[in-house]
Amino acid sequence: MGKSTIRIGLLGMGTVGTGVVRLLTAHRADLERKAGAKLELARVAVKDASKPRDVDLPKGMITEDAVSVLRDPSIDLIVELIGGLMPARMYVMEAIKAKKHIVTANKALLAEHWAEIVGAARANGVEVYFEGAVGGGIPIIQSLSEGLAANRIEAIFGIVNGTSNYILTRMDKDGKTFPEALKEAQKKGYAEADPALDVGGGDAAHKLTVLTSLAFETTVPFASVHVEGIEDLTPQDFVWAREEFGYVVKLLAIAKQEEGKLEVRVHPALLPETHLLADVDGAYNAIYVVGDAVGATMFYGLGAGQMPTASAVVSDILYVARSIAYDVAGRAGWGPFGDIPHTPVNLPVRPMEELTCRYYLRLSAMDQPGVLSAIAKILADHRVSIAAVVQKERSKGDKVPVVILTYEALEKDMQEARRQIESLPAVKGKIVLLRVERGE
Ligand SMILES: NC(=O)c1ccc[n+]([C@@H]2O[C@H](COP(=O)([O-])OP(=O)(O)OC[C@H]3O[C@@H](n4cnc5c(N)ncnc54)[C@H](OP(=O)(O)O)[C@@H]3O)[C@@H](O)[C@H]2O)c1
């Protein structure tokens, strides 16, 4: 039997939760028509009920007792917008066991506990939807699970962290250093006080784990994702990449399937300046998906923020509410894409050392004879061929920046060569190594 009223329990009413309440209120009539049922916000759990809120709710609706919301038998659907792993994980698991459907925007939780959540949802016949977890307002989850369902996905290239993309854009366009651009991002509200998860690549890796698990119908262990951040980049890297070689620098989330193995990695990369992703600037996100039938597609929009993310969360609420209203919720599987992952064996993730690509190296060397030939010899000894070398004018003292672009080489060889070059007495400090992506 379907239901004519869907009762919603909201866990967390911060940035996104407040946006969700706003949308549910402002668009109520349209949403209810689309859902085929009344949508009733039943209870809202927060950490501190005494905090002033930006939305008016009936007295008694807000509680600090999240467990009472999960256990309320009249609630059909739990919307988890607390974030982080604990207590969100415990609440989501408890709600699933109580046979309540879930909508969440929590990429960390999904990335790190995908198998547990999917397993529990399947076992309990409930649905879990998570459009807001990747790309904010961009409907990438639905696009992958429905719009592109006829395809075998070959590759995904994403700019999925708005904070990092904003910082990189400021470094590129205004010549700011990383600390200067980070400070500006924090001032404008694009970066958290603790930006480590964003600039270190962890947030993008969470999103990539979710995208890859869905797109390739597998479970990607979060620990198998290779992650590097943007902290070591300098404004000169953008100038040299563009002016010398015709590339932009972006923090890319990359997933590819080749010969039955997955590549899943997040790192700053050089991308041709003619690529569609090269113009995705500021806090915008974009996900470039290559399918075997459709070819290349790109999904673009605001990757975070109150109303863009609420747009995604409310679309999930609508979807699940409609399923409950027509009594089909959970019957066709646990969430987007029905019942996946259904592959009997998860796809193995290719170890990073097996990657083959071109590299950009930036190093600082003493301005003295024989240094370049010593570097070239180490590279040649490791089967790394040089495509171009640019030696810049002296920066400080007698050190000169040297930029090298290589032809395709094996990551293992490249890393070993990097270690040996770093140990040359004439080479000072760390080598910055960026991978060059064609993006297709
Ligand atoms: N912000 C974005 O632009 C964005 C974009 C995409 C996805 N997301 C995801 O959306 C989720 C929510 O993010 P947000 O930015 O809205 O977070 P937020 O502003 O920090 O809000 C978190 C909410 O959770 C509540 N809370 C914290 N601990 C709780 C507990 N133990 N029990 C009950 N409630 C608790 C807080 O209560 P108080 O209000 O009382 O402190 C607050 O209302 C996260 O998973 C995040 O990754 C956010």
Image (cartoon, rainbow, N blue to C red):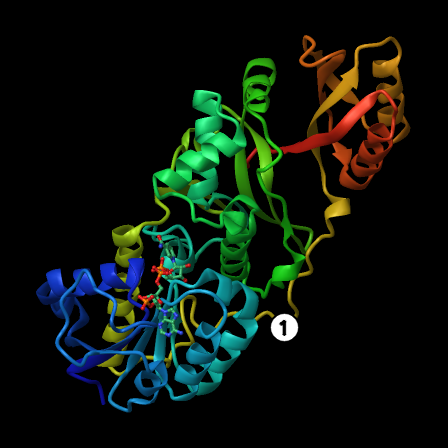
Q: Residues within 10 Å of mark 1 (few under 14, many from 20)?
A: few
Task: State the residue in front, 85 or 110.
Answer: 85
Residue, disc 1: 344
Q: Does the closest atom of ligand 1 sit within 8 Å of the Cβ of label 1?
A: no
Apparent side of residue 27 relative to residue 53 in the rendered image (left or right): left
Type of amino acid at the residue the image marks with label 1: Pro
Image point (63%, 44%), residue name = 228
Furthest residue in direction front, as rendered: 50
Image point (34%, 84%), residue name = 70
Residue 176: percent from left, percent from top? 48, 25
Furthest residue in direction left, as rendered: 29
For the N terminus, give its image quadrant.
bottom left
Residue 304: percent from left, percent from top? 35, 49
Apparent side of residue 67 relative to residue 266 in the rendered image (left or right): left
With respect to residue 93, does 400 lie above or below? above
User: What element does badge 1 sit on?
Assistant: loop
